[in-house]
Image (spheres, rainbow, N blue to C red):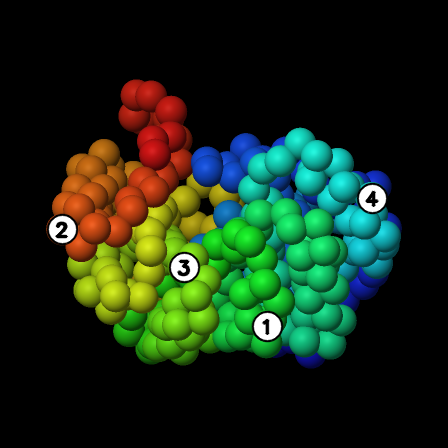
Amino acid sequence: MFSDTQLAPMKAKSVISVSKLPNVDYVYNPYIGCSFGCLYCYSRYMGRFFGHSKAQWGSYVYWKSNAIQLLEKESIRIKKKGGLVLIGSVTDCYQPIEKKLHLTRDSLRIFLKNQIPISILTKSTLAERDFDLLTQFNYCEFGVSVSILDSKVSRTFEPLVSTPRERIKLLRKANQSGLDTYTFIGPIHPFLSNTQAIFRRVSNITNSIMGEIINLKCGNWKNIQSSLRKLDIFDEDYKNQANSESFYLKNKHILNIMCERSSIKFKGIYKHYNPGLKGPSNI
């Protein structure tokens, strides 16, 4: 729970980094760690920089106390160079502490002042608070993550985030506000994620779609195993399918075809490199 999470300020040397993610030039993370603590999250590796193990993901959040001062300077450089900034690549910038600190909102004011193109991805309905700022950008891409539609099953993997229904409602409000909306279908779980059903729920409120296959190589397997047992799913079947090329290709084909039929931009589907397969990650 949020009340049990270790919260602490930190001083950052810089706040905007060059991105290694597709379709994004820079990333900006006002927080390190995330009290949502989704069991599957790949960002748990961030803990090693602060003395936390991968297993402690969700138990700590550090906020960059000098983020606004640094952003004032660094945003000028980004404005000159140009490019898209993703806000929250290894954290949800609308996790509970944001309601108190307003660090994301204060950052948005600086990006807006310089009219820097931004992209946001969240699982939190708190984001609606900032629609008044987001709608003033010349370009703002607003994305919502949806992985599993069944709220009870979803709670097993992501117990503290907004429900799938609430997130889809958030996406609808963003779309109605005129924002460039996208749906991140991920992580895609074998036996649990119905990409076709998710697509049907968002097809009339999203401008583009991106997907991601579950990453089982980041220290999250024990947590996932525990959840699978609660759902009476054999973990080895799940793991074998998640790591298979056929599972990736099947979901890629489904999303590609459905996007073509609905004239929705398909931004690709990401899978993490599997040493047992040939080639790098695919988009």
Q: Is residue 34 above or below residue 177?
A: above
Q: Which residue is mark 1?
A: 132
Q: Are marks 3 and 1 in contact (CB under 8 Å)?
A: no
> Three-letter amino acid code at disc 1?
Asp
Type of the residue with mark 4: Lys
Q: CA distance from mark 2 to mark 3?
A: 18 Å
Whether residue 61 is visible here, answered yes or no, is no
Residue positioned 33% across, 60% down in the render = 206
Dividing the picture into quadrants, the one containing residue 201 is bottom left
Q: Which residue is mark 4?
A: 73
Which residue was labeled with disc 3? Answer: 181
Q: Nearer the viewer, residue 222 or 205?
A: 205
Q: Please name which of the two marks, 1 or 2, marks the residue nearer to the observer.
A: 1
Disc 2/disc 4 C-alpha distance (Å): 45 Å
Labels 2 and 3 touching (C-beta < 8 A): no
Q: Label 2, on which residue?
A: 261
SS of the residue under disc 3: strand
Give how far apart the Cα atoms at labels 1 and 2 are.
33 Å
Q: Which amino acid, mark 2?
A: Arg
